[in-house]
Amino acid sequence: MTDTSTYTLLDGKALSAILKKEIGLEVAAMVKQGLRAPHLAAILVGEDGASMTYVGSKVKTCDELGFESTLITLKPETTEAELLEEIEAVNNNDSIDGLIVQLPLPKHISVEKITTAIHPRKDVDGFNPVNVGRMVQNLPAYLPATPFGILQMLESHQVPTEGKHCVVIGRSNIVGMPMSVLMARNGYPGNCTVTLCHSRTANLKEEVKRADIVIAALGKPGFVKGDMIKPGAVVIDVGITRVEDATRKAGFRLAGDVDFESVAPLCSYITPVPGGVGPMTIIGLLQNTLKAARHEIYS
Ligand code: GUN
């Protein structure tokens, strides 16, 4: 049998380890200068297992790299008004640089109201409409952490993007929508011709097959198969769905949106799951928090 697998793995775990060291050194230098360490506050409403894990690893990474962190955990029945009060308190706390409210939120709370209430200066998730608008206009803005992490993965391998056809699958405010904007913008990585596919897209398979760069962010394990991929494509897998697996200690494993086995042999570059986009997301968040502490986006 001929081995056709010539792809390069975009290793988010390795890149995140390098960037963590850099961030840690920058924080140490700030503190040595007599400045306060960057301080991230995270609000978690409810007890969703995956959200608890994500917030926990954000806080843990803060501690590792010398950031201050404050975790505010609220009961699932917390009202929207109570959450807004918590946000206001953090907005007015001069010792906190960045604030995230972990999503998803319980159904009785409006995500739009919450993201809008976080002060744009402290909005290190980049979900406030002010930051989204600035991003769209290519102005300095906090970029959402996952897309920001993906850009850095492409950059680290100098993956060519100019003039390429990029197909993004999924139009969420957290990944798909910002990713489509960032891949189209004038710069590197960017300058792509972008197609944003979603649940109502006709002929999805044909659209994906035309792509030089595929960014799969739809949250359906193994959705993207080898027969949807143009040979030589770059494939970025944003999926991290928990699927039951009795052979694992935790009772589940993390599955990407891409069927790695059938897709990887066709690719020039591909991200693994786990160890791809996931570890880069926390990096993006901490880089934004460092920027917030340094007043880099808003003077
Ligand atoms: N839920 C899934 N991804 C994210 C993220 O990047 N930020 C927040 N706040 N919640 C999320």
Image (tube, rainbow, N blue to C red):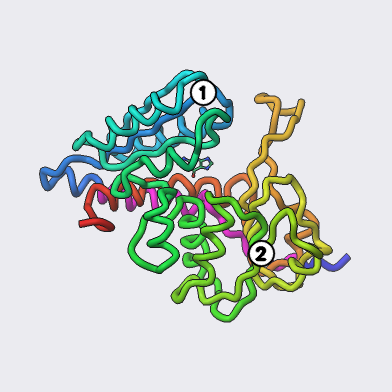
Q: Residues within 10 Å of mark 1 (few under 14, many from 20)?
A: some
Span highlighted in magenta in the image: 5-26
Residue 179 lies in quadrant: bottom right
Q: Secondary structure at mark 2?
A: strand
- The magenta stretch spans residue 149: no
Q: Residue furthest bottom?
A: 163
Task: Name which residue lies at 52% across and 76% down.
Answer: 191
Task: Name which residue lies at 65% across and 47% down.
Answer: 239
Task: Name which residue lies at 64% across and 64% down.
Answer: 196
Relative image position of residue 214 (x, y in whole percent) = 66, 64
- The one of 105 and 164 positioned closer to us in this rendering: 105
Q: What amino acid is found at the position of numbered circle 1 in the picture? A: Gly
Q: Residue 187: tell me if it is visible.
A: yes
Relative image position of residue 228 (x, y in whole percent) = 80, 64
- The magenta stretch spans residue 18: yes
Q: Residue 270: tell me if it is visible.
A: no
Q: Residues within 10 Å of mark 2 (few under 14, many from 20)?
A: many
Q: Which residue is mark 1?
A: 46
Q: Which residue is mark 2?
A: 214
Locate residue 87 relative to residue 211 in the image: left or right: left
Relative image position of residue 236 (x, y in whole percent) = 62, 59
Sequence-earlier tag: 1 or 2: 1
> Is residue 292 positioned above or below 252 on the image?
below
> Is residue 117 positioned above or below 72 on the image?
below
